């Protein structure tokens, strides 16, 4: 795992004073920021002198009071850019989740290849392709740049971002910050911790699916949005806000309406004992999934203030780390489950293999998009956004089977959508407030930047 991280992150080149020679935090970029600041100050000074010579009229003063300061405009622009990225990855995640859900249900229920742990191992392990795919995309964009220059820039970006994640500092050029940073060890440790939380949460779903009813399974597991909010308070120091709390509660209520609004006789006849233990198992999974989202945001995302490009690239790298850990470590239970006859491995048919491959790739795209979404916004908003898939899957089932949506599905889906819109507005206001308050500015560019410096 450490060798894989070492290959991705590389090691930084250093100049004569020991600072990282990353083009992303280069002196010309900082000089451009300082020059822009000096120009603004000179312009402001010129305007001040002019105003002293010619005092503004009442209408002019009122207009100036209504005008927005450059800091407010920059904060709004940064928040809009983050939300534009987040909106794109939200759409991608919703579409790919629906595809994955339909394909997985068809493979497990219709085709009979019901191998819970193996399916989870394949889906989570597929995340390792995220970083190579991103690297190919970035290389295609920068195909006119020599490979050695492109690769060095990319390694420096990943290395400096990993130091930011570990030290929670934007100024990675300080010798004090670099001396105490051990990004490879840090990333390996928290990859193991976060992947374990995700694996146990995902496995609980596969175990409980045969013990409890679909209604209980859907309702309890999707309460992870509530637990994400609960864990965000102590781990992310997120203040309790009435509007966000209300949005989360409305979303959970919408899930309950969808789950229990139309309970059929088969669900009602489920064995009481198995259902009870199944609900406990899926309840533990719900808590752990909410914890996984918050742990990822706290310990694997760059601090606030980095550019959206940098945050997006590092989120995809961390997803690839989860996939690499899954492939290299979590294969161990597979032969044990086979020997103990708990889950015997059976090679599926060729057609089933193609469907499994499509489901696995859909999950990889969904997971990468979801990690980027959390990195750019918050675990709470991302969790509530994920609840939209309940309504979307119901619509896809309606289009596929011809069975119309029930009143409960429509009412509950409307509640979830309303909660998501309200939470989105609240999060957007928080982003603008934070961008306006922050003192440190990330002048760095990503691999997508236009700078050609070494």
Image: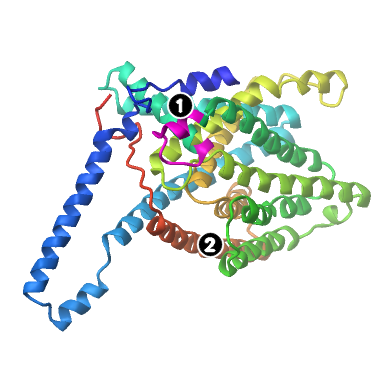
Q: Position of residue 158 (x, y in %)?
A: 44, 29
Task: Say which quadrant the C terminus sits in.
Answer: top left
Q: Position of residue 237 (x, y in %)?
A: 59, 55
Label ID, residue 98: none
Q: Whole-Å distance between the Cαs marked 1 and 2? A: 32 Å
Residue placed furthest toward the left: 53
- Name the image quarter holding residue 28: top left
Q: Position of residue 104 (x, y in %)?
A: 66, 36
Image disc number at residue 423: 2
Residue 427 position (above or below residue 23): below
Q: Residues within 10 Å of mark 1 (few under 14, many from 20)?
A: few
Q: Up-down: is 121 above or below 53?
A: above
**Residue 67 appears left or right of 417:** left
* Image quarter (top left, top right, bottom left or bottom right) of the N terminus: top right
Q: Position of residue 18 (x, y in %)?
A: 38, 25
Q: Is residue 450 left or right of residue 393?
A: left
Residue occupying image coordinates x 84% and y 57%: 265
Looking at the image, which residue is at 52% across and 25% down?
A: 129
Q: Is residue 95 visible?
A: no
* Secondary structure of the residue carrying numbered label 1: helix
Residue denoted by label 1: 133
Nearest to viewer (mark 1 / mark 2)? 2
**Residue in the foreground of this view, choosing between 258 and 322:** 322
Residue at screen point 14% across, 58% down: 43
**Relative side of 420 to 200, left or right:** left
Looking at the rendering, the stretch of residues picked out in magenta corresponds to 165-179
Residue 155 seen in the figure: yes
Q: How is the image coloured?
A: rainbow
For the residue pair 183 and 226, the one nearer the viewer reads as 183
- Disc 2 element: helix
């Amino acid at each position: 795992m450490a060798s894989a991280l070492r290959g991705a992150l590389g090691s930084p080149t250093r100049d004569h004073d020991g600072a990282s020679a990353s083009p992303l935090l280069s002196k010309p970029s900082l000089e451009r920021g300082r020059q822009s600041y000096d120009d603004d100050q000179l312009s402001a000074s010129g305007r001040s002198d002019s105003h002293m010579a010619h005092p503004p009229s009442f209408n002019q003063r009122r207009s100036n009071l209504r005008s927005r300061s450059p800091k407010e405009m920059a904060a709004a622009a940064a928040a809009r850019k983050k939300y534009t990225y987040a909106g794109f990855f939200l759409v991608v995640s919703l579409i790919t989740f629906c595809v994955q859900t339909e394909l997985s249900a068809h493979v497990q229920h219709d085709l009979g290849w019901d191998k819970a742990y193996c399916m989870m191992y394949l889906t989570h392990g597929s995340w390792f392709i995220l970083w190579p795919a991103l690297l190919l995309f970035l290389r295609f964009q920068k195909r006119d740049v020599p490979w050695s220059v492109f690769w060095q820039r990319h390694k420096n970006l990943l290395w400096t971002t990993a130091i930011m994640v570990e030290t929670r500092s934007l100024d990675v050029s300080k010798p004090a910050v670099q001396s105490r940073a051990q990004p490879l060890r840090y990333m390996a440790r928290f990859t193991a911790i976060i992947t374990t939380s995700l694996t146990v949460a995902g496995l609980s779903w596969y175990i409980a699916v045969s013990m409890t009813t679909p209604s209980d399974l859907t309702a309890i597991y999707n309460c992870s949005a509530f637990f994400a909010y609960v864990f965000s308070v102590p781990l992310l120091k997120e203040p309790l806000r009435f509007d966000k709390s209300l949005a989360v509660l409305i979303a959970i209520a919408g899930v309950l309406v969808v789950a229990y609004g139309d309970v059929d006789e088969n669900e009602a006849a489920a064995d009481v004992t198995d259902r009870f233990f199944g609900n406990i198992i899926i309840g533990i999974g719900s808590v752990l999934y909410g914890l996984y989202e918050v742990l990822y945001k706290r310990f694997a995302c760059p601090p606030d203030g980095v550019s959206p490009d940098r945050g997006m690239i590092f989120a995809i790298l961390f997803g690839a780390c989860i996939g690499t850990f899954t492939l290299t470590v979590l294969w161990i239970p597979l032969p044990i489950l086979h020997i103990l006859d708990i889950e015997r491995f059976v090679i599926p048919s060729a057609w089933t293999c193609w469907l499994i491959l499509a489901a696995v790739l859909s999950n990889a795209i969904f997971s990468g998009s979801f990690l980027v979404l959390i990195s750019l916004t918050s675990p709470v908003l991302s969790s509530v956004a994920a609840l939209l898939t309940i309504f979307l899957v119901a619509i896809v089932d309606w289009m596929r089977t011809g069975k119309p949506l029930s009143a409960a599905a429509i009412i509950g889906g409307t509640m979830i959508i309303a909660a998501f819109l309200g939470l989105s507005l609240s999060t957007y206001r928080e982003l603008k407030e934070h961008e306006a308050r922050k003192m440190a500015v990330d002048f760095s560019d990503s691999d997508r930047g236009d700078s050609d410096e070494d």
